[in-house]
Each structure stands twice: as structure tokens, then as C-alpha cells.
Amino acid sequence: MIITKPRDWTRILGNLDEVGAKRVFIMGCGQCASVAGTGDEKAILQAKAALEQSGREVTGWAIGEVACHLAAMRLETRKRHGEIESADAVLVLTCGSGVQTVADSVDKPVFPGLESVFLGNVIRHGVFEERCQMCGDCVLDLTAGICPVTTCPKGLLNGPCGGMWAGKCEVLTDRECTHVRIQRRLAEQGRTRVAEIPAKDFSKKLKPGSINMRAPKDEGEGKP
Amino acid sequence: MSRLKDTLARGEFVVTGEVAPPVGTDVAAMRRSAETLGPHCHALNVTDNQAATLHLASLGACRLVLEWGFEPVFQQTCRDRNRLALQSDLLAASALGITNVLLLTGDDPRWGDHPEAKAVFDIDSTQLVRAAAGLNAGRDMHGDELTGATDLFIGAAVFPEAEPWDIQLARAVQKVDAGVEFFQTQAIFDTDALERAVAALRPRGVKVIAGVILLRSVRTIDFINERVAGLMVPEAVRERVAGAADPKEEAVALAIEQVRAIRGIADGVHIMPLGLDGVVPRILAEAGLT
Ligand code: SF4
Ligand code: SF4
């Protein structure tokens, strides 16, 4: 899921001041930001109280079922048309993706209420760790299911680097070096490691990403 | 042309030193360092934004070292440049008469003086070695032909004391397969670890130059143990320096012993003086190297 965290509140108030927003509508998200507890009802009510304390009025709030879904967000904002129309700005407690669907769905100034930080695994309730950077050219087949791109702080495909000491990572010294883990797990599974993983093809992950599943498929791509 | 390469090829023991470019444009101190160490060394390593801290560019500093009459080893890390910049700097090195290169991963910027910087690590040091070998063969990483190949003597780092050794060795062998011709090691305290590294790597046709670091004080040792990646000064060494009447002299005595020991094991010694440039000639002389 997409991990979000609270954003500097003075910056948010500054944003609202810039457009002279006295009346604000708040949008949350029923997916990731709800699991993270940053864009659920509780978080929205907290933001509402803080806005009211700063002398602003909250015209209404909603939790988009999937805030990053453009068609669904258009529908959601249409349903709340009156409350949004009477607001001077919309504060969005979702990831940056959700903020943009809201910005594309309403005519009012829209501001991010959270920081979007990474694609995270839920380790346990409230504890998230980044395990994948969605590089578009997955090497987990070669690395025993441990991502070097993400979990090696330097993102090295071949390692360990010279900073590894006693199996520990140079950068995150309380963690085991990713490359030590990879090679140990490969050995445990009786697998031989590839001699050298070649340089990453960053053209596999050009910005902005775009996929159209409805377009005719390339030969040899996609289906098993 | 590389005197370092030729001397190693003849099977002679080599000495390399290390100079750090300034944080600024005043190269006077670096020149003094080069002129103190240079006459006693086959080549001088020039560090590349060491410890992820801003310094004058290694490539430019290498050219200065060359103009001052000494042979540089151009250290290049993967931290600050993508594959385009790395390759173009290697081409520039070759065109400027800089032949020896030491290709490294690089320390993470979050420990340096610009923690806000984006770490590049577009490629890793194995891949950089392969790229350099390709440039020597007249092709870039994309496979396109160059107008004029490089003539680089390709080095990389190995860490004989870093456990687990089997994983460390696998990485070193991987670098050899990618095109490494010589290794320089991190500072060595455990000669058994050095012996095992040399025994494993020499049969693969590569030379091993072992590191010696001058530990002028307990403060230096504590700083290294806390801040320098991939190096731990053993407690026994720390106690020896701490207990000495003259810690600096003790550091010199220790270095002499280490150089003597390395002489019997490796293909060369790499001295990192950490500011004690002036004592290096004496260390080499007393270890019987001049
Ligand atoms: S290699 Fe790592 S970052 Fe790339 S897709 Fe696989 S898990 Fe994600
Ligand atoms: S010690 Fe291992 S995990 Fe840490 S930066 Fe180096 S290679 Fe990556």
C-alpha cells in the first residue's frame, strides 16, 4: 500500500492563507490512507478540529472510496457538490495521487494534507516498511525474493559494498546487509547466485508511467 | 602508460600513497602532500569526494598530480554520477594521461556533509568495472564503438577483514570476472585475513595491494571506528597506541611492522597517512622498501 504521513501543519495553514481560504472541505481516502490512519474518519475529524481552531469553517468532509480512482472521485465530488462549492479550498488527506484526482475533479484550489512517502509493506498494525520501489524490471527472481533495489540503501544490484561489516549494513547499522541476506537465502535454498546482475535498464521505468490495458497487446507480452 | 602496472607486471613490490583534494581551490596542501609522498611511491591515489564530503574533483586533482611529476590513481565512486558521467570521466582520464583507476561504490551521502544530496548509484562498482573494461576494448556500455579506446589499468577495492568472508570473496571474484586487474584493500590489521585474500585472488591473475593506515592517536582510532565504513581498528591496536608514551611514534612503529608483514604476503602496500605524510619515507625506509 501507499504509505502517507502527516504533513507540516503550518505549511498547510500557509497554503490556505495564500488563497484566503476561510471555508474548507476535507477529502480522505478509504484505502491506503485509512489503513495508515492518515486519511480515515479519525484523521479527518482531527484536521477538522484543527482547522476550526485556526478560525476556519469546515463546510463538509468525505472519504473517497478509492481516492486515486478518477471516475469514482468525479462521482464522489459531484455528490458533495454543494459543500465543495461553498468552500474556498479543499484539503486532501490522501497520497499525492489522490490529491491529483481531487484537483482534476473540482474547480477549487486543492492542497495536499499528507506527505506520500513510499510503497510499504504492513509489518504489523501501524508499522510499515518499504520493500519495493516498482522499478519495472524486477530482479526478485535472482535475489531470493529480497529486493536489493529498495532494501540496500544504495540500491546496489551487486554487493555487498565495502561498508558491510560483520554482516551488517554500513548505512543502517542495525540491519543485516541485504546482499548478505540474499546470498544466505540462496544458499539455504540450494540455489546458485547469478555471477553478476547487469546494470539496470532505467528506461523500463520512465516517468510518468502509463499503461492502457484496453490497447491491443504486444506479441509475447502479458498473458502466461 | 602506467608505471604502477609495469612494476606489478614485473613482479616487484609496489608502494602507493594517498592524497586528498582540498575542499576549495587552494591546492597548496595537496601539492605538499604529493611532493612528500610522491618520490617514495609508484602512484598516488586521489580520493573522490571521500566520506561523501565535497572536495575538488578527483579527475582534475589527478591531472595536477600528473603535472607535478607523479603518477595518480583516479578514484571514482558510483555515488555522484550516472553511467554517462562515469564513462565520460573515464574517457577524459585516458585523454589526460591518467591510466590507473580505482572503481568504488562510494559512501552513502547521508553520512556526508551534503545529506540532502540525491545518491546516484545508477550502477554499482562491478558494473563500473565492466564498463571500464569495455572502454578499454573500444566500446561504451551501450555497445557503441568509441573513437579511440581508453587504456585504463583497472583497480577495485577488496575488504579482507570483512566477514562473512565467503560473501566478500564472491564479490571480489565477481569484480575480477568483470575486468579488475588490481585490488587495493582497506587497512589491514589481521595478516591471516590478508593471506587468505591474496591466496584466493592471486591465482586469478590479479595483484593485491594491502592498506596500511597511520593511527596517530586514540582520537583518530575512535573516529575511524565510529565513522569510517568497512574498517574497525582492533582493541589490541587501540590499547597499544593508547598506552604508548608517544602515540605518534607508536603509530610509526606499528606501520613499520605492518609494511614488513605485508611485504611477505601481498604485491604492494597502500599507505594512508591521515595527515602524517612526513613520516612515510621513514616507515618505508625502515621496512626496507627504499
Ligand atoms: S526489483 Fe525490487 S523495486 Fe524492482 S519491482 Fe522487484 S521488488 Fe520492486
Ligand atoms: S552494507 Fe549491504 S545493504 Fe548496506 S549499503 Fe552496503 S551493500 Fe547495501
Image (spheres, rainbow, N blue to C red):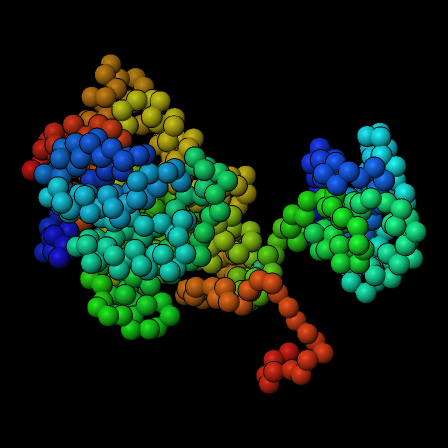
**Does B286 appear above or below A96?**
above
The residue positioned farthest toward the left in the image shown: B290
Q: Quadrant of ligand 1?
A: bottom right
Residue B199, how many percent across, how many down? 26, 53
**Residue in the picture at 22% in, 35% down:** B27
Q: Quadrant of residue B201?
A: bottom left
* Quarter of the C terminus of chain A within the rendering: bottom right
> Residue drawn at (24%, 26%), measured in percent from left and top?
B251
Q: Residue furthest top?
A: B245
User: In this rendering, does residue B177 appear at all?
Assistant: no
> Vertically, is A93 above or below B255?
below
Where the N terminus of chain A falls, by quadrant?
A: bottom right
Residue that lies at the very extreme toward the front in this rendered image: A20
Front residue of B235/A71: it is A71
Q: Residue at x 32, y 19 (%)?
A: B242
State how many labels appear: 0
Residue B144 at x, y percent in the picture: 33, 73
Residue B112: image location, x then y, percent: 43, 37
Would you say B236 lies left or right of A110 here?
A: left
- Res A72 → quadrant: bottom right
Q: In this view, does B249 lie to the left or right of A4?
A: left
Front one among A115 and A188? A115
Q: Do we see residue B122 in this rendering?
A: yes
